[in-house]
Amino acid sequence: MTDRKKEVLDSIRVNRLVVIARNILPENMLETARALYRGGIRLMEITFSQEADSMEATAESIALVRKHLPGDMIVGAGTVLTQEQLICARDAGAEFILSPGTDQSIIKGTRAMGLVSVPGALTASEISQAYIWGADIVKLFPAGVMGISYLKAIRGPLNHIPLMMVGDISEDNIGGFLRAGAVSFGVGSNILKQKYRENQDYEAITKLAEIYVKRIKEEGDETILDNH
């Protein structure tokens, strides 16, 4: 593992929260990223949509954030479904790769590029297979739909596999998932609310980011105390 890949993994484990930026135009992405950064966010996932003309816009957004924000804001790419998207994300500067499902070729391609691999999975079989193929962290998706009790059940036999919760993660359930053993979280529209994005209300985005960062820190501190 390269030193940089270790730094990215360490940031995911320490900061825990990845904000998912979906359907945001490149001309609005930089200010959105700055608003998140002011709120304490240090990890962003900029997603691909699957329209034919979307790759260029996603790559532009990733490159903009990488260029203009401080180096401790780490940018990844999400909804990576093809090798073409994977290469595009790497070339734009993405340092971690998320997908909604488990695809061996994407996992192995990500690792060959020296990037952090976070494929999505749901069942114990899928989670195990993703990890065997080389996932650094497995994205449990859709986590909020399945619930905290599902995470507890999965972690019984698979507590050696680091899991990121994505899908319907909210201020209300994030603490329960953290106490149940989640390593990290992906949160999209619950922070980047559509009305704030449409109105370019970056101050509101910053305030929501602060709430989630504070909640994770408080719950994380309590979890550490509970385990000692």
Image (cartoon, rainbow, N blue to C red):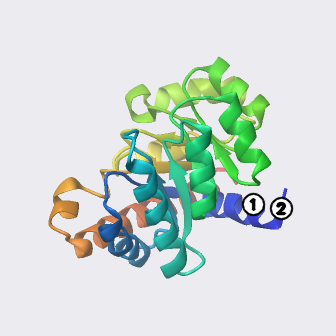
Mark 2 element type: loop
Is the residue 179 above or below the residue 102 in the image? Answer: below
Type of amino acid under label 1: Lys
| Residue that mark 1 sits on | 5
Is the residue 36 above or below the residue 140 in the image? Answer: below
For the point 28% across and 67% down, which residue is it? 205
Left or right relative to 218: residue 92 = right
Is the residue 47 above or below the residue 80 in the image? Answer: below
The extreme right residue here reads 1
**Residue 177: where, in percent of width, then height?**
49, 42
For the point 54% across and 63% down, which residue is it? 75
Which label sits on residue 2? 2
Left or right relative to 45: residue 193 = left
Can residue 34 be seen at all in this image of the molecule? Answer: yes
Type of amino acid under label 2: Thr
Q: Quadrant of the N terminus?
A: bottom right
Residues at marks 2 and 1, CA–CA distance in whole angstroms: 5 Å
**Residue 56: where, in percent of width, then height?**
44, 56
Q: Pointer 2 and pointer 1: residues touching (CB < 8 Å)?
A: yes
Residue density around tag 1, few if under 14, some if 14–19, many if 20 or more, within 10 Å: some
Can residue 187 be seen at all in this image of the molecule? Answer: no
Left or right relative to 179: residue 159 = right
Mark 1 element type: helix
